[in-house]
Image (spheres, rainbow, N blue to C red):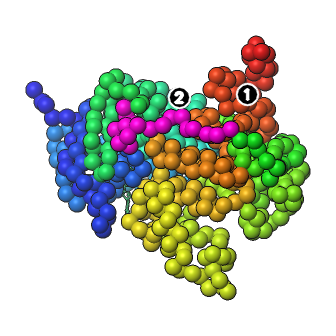
Amino acid sequence: MNTQPFLRMDDIHKRFGDLVASGGVTLEVEENEIHSLLGENGAGKSVLMNILCGVLSPNEGQIIYRGEPLRLGSPREAIRHGIGMVHQHFMLVPNLTVAENYVLGQGMPARVISNMRDVYARIRELSERYGLDVRPDALIQDLSVGEQQRVEILKVLFHGIDLLILDEPTAVLTPQETDRLLVLLRDLVKDGKTVIFISHKLDEVMTVSDRVSVMRDAKVVFTTRAADTNPRELARMMVGRDVLMELPRTNRTPGRTVFSVDGLSCDNEIGLPAVRNVSLEVREGEIVGIAGVSGNGQSELALAMTGLLPVTSGTISLNGEEISRLPPGEVNRRPIGHIPEDRHKMGIVLPLALTENVLLQRYNRPPFAKHGLLKFGTIAEHTRDLIRRFRVKASGEFDLIQNLSGGNQQKLVVARELARDPDFLLINQLTRGIDIGAMELVMQEVLKQREAGRAILLISTELEELFAICDRILVMFHGELVGELPPDRGRIEEMGLLMAGDRQEAARLAAART
Ligand SMILES: Nc1ncnc2c1ncn2[C@@H]1O[C@H](COP(=O)(O)OP(=O)(O)OP(=O)(O)O)[C@@H](O)[C@H]1O
């Protein structure tokens, strides 16, 4: 009898200078299972998977795959062995079509490329078989994030992959898209594929996995069948302590209005109406949430509030001053903190050091500059302080931010913006990519800002995040605010109805409660 597992990564070591990303990791995966990989930010999940798909080579250790030692020099070699990965950040070329992306640089036989009709036919066949709804001639830049995700998955299937690795695939998906993805993963397993799934969301891990492994400090510390564990145990294994799912907060009467929006409308980047007649106010010491399925105008609302998208009508005011028609640089001079939705596009500059990223947009202002000269000592000390307070895993303040794991990049952006002590804090997706322990820390820090009297607007697709810290929650649908609810988990059904635009049914439910 063959007792070899389908895949065994054996005593893998990977170091970057002094930093140990894999410190003797052993992971076994069975054929035809969904195996989830969990762990704190920076535990070493992505590095391990990058080794398995040929992006990185280990310093020591070996991979045994289908009973044979496997040495990979590139992702292309991994694909030849049937191993493919969908990365946290998509790797598609935006101005090419789906089909062009699939044949690009993959060393496809010339006869395949010369006959794009065959490529189209294969894409259509796979798309139909797995219900993926991918059009071969669509331009990547015209697709939503969820659609791009499907294109990435289909690309891996297109190359005949048996072992599929997905690194946080649901971080940017809507709940409906996530459900579809989880069903797809089960279908793939039925078709004989094997899946390794990385996620910080314990409920979906419990739903979809056959087995789960937990990484801590660059090692796998625990593997179990999903049926034999629960979210609380998994959280404890990841973080090394019990995680508070409920955060204590004080009752607080909000103070004066700090930030307000009145009758605001704006268009999206291609000139279509995105935000329609939105009015809201945020007061001192208050956290106001905006719930909604992504793509309902939240991104445009946030951009308009920070001066990055022109307002077509209505006003935006901060501390009584109208700021709706100020250029972005002027808005940025006001006491506003902004945690953007997509940290790679707006929050950080990847090839720069942590110190430089902390300084972004503030390089000419005290305390970091005096008489036009940068105060390097102050900048370094401030960055070290943020790293310590937010437990950012980095070798030091001069580390390049691109060397940090995704969740640690997010923690640095949050730390930087909270430290600016702004009067108004605009947060669009607070905990994206952040592990469950760090989530607790980051939410506590936002609550401290509330205690300090900041006015906070939290746009989020994560209801748990909104319920945990908001004082009241507005719901956005098709560019409009369609309702307001207290952060009461008992009213989650009503909120779901509002998020789907069904005001009547939501009102009926609300009436039935009273
Ligand atoms: N190219 C690199 N150079 C230096 N350090 C790196 C590099 N790539 C990764 N690291 C470090 O290796 C460690 C593990 O990172 P990895 O991305 O595997 O974490 P992760 O478990 O996937 O975290 P997250 O949940 O935040 O995505 C981190 O400390 C990271 O900073």
- The residue at 44%/33% (across/down) is 202
Residue 344, position as x, y percentages in the image: 56, 58
Is residue 269 shown to the viewer in this render?
A: no
Q: Residue furthest top?
A: 512
Query: Which kind of residue does numbered mark 1 sit on?
Result: Leu
Q: Secondary structure at mark 2?
A: helix
Cα distance in 3D space between marks 2 and 1: 19 Å
- The answer to which image quadrant residue 495 occupies is top right
- Name above or below for residue 309 compared with residue 384: above
Left or right: residue 505 versus residue 77 is right
234 is within the stretch colored magenta: yes
Q: Position of residue 369 (x, y in %)?
A: 63, 80
Instruction: Tell me: residue 191, above or below residue 368.
Output: above
Residue drawn at x 61%, y 57% as measured from the top left: 418
Mark closer to the chain start, 2 or 1: 2
Which SS does the magenta portion mostly show? loop
Between residue 205 and residue 434, name the one nearer to us: 434
Q: What's drawn in magenta, residue-wise?
A: 233-251
Q: Is residue 445 left or right of residue 451?
A: left
Q: Which residue is mark 2?
A: 179
Residue 22 % position (x, y): 28, 54
Residue at 41% x, 41% y is: 198
Identify the residue position indicated by label 1 in the image: 498
Instruction: Return the residue nearer the eye: 258 or 277.
Output: 258
Most foreground residue, 440 or 309: 440
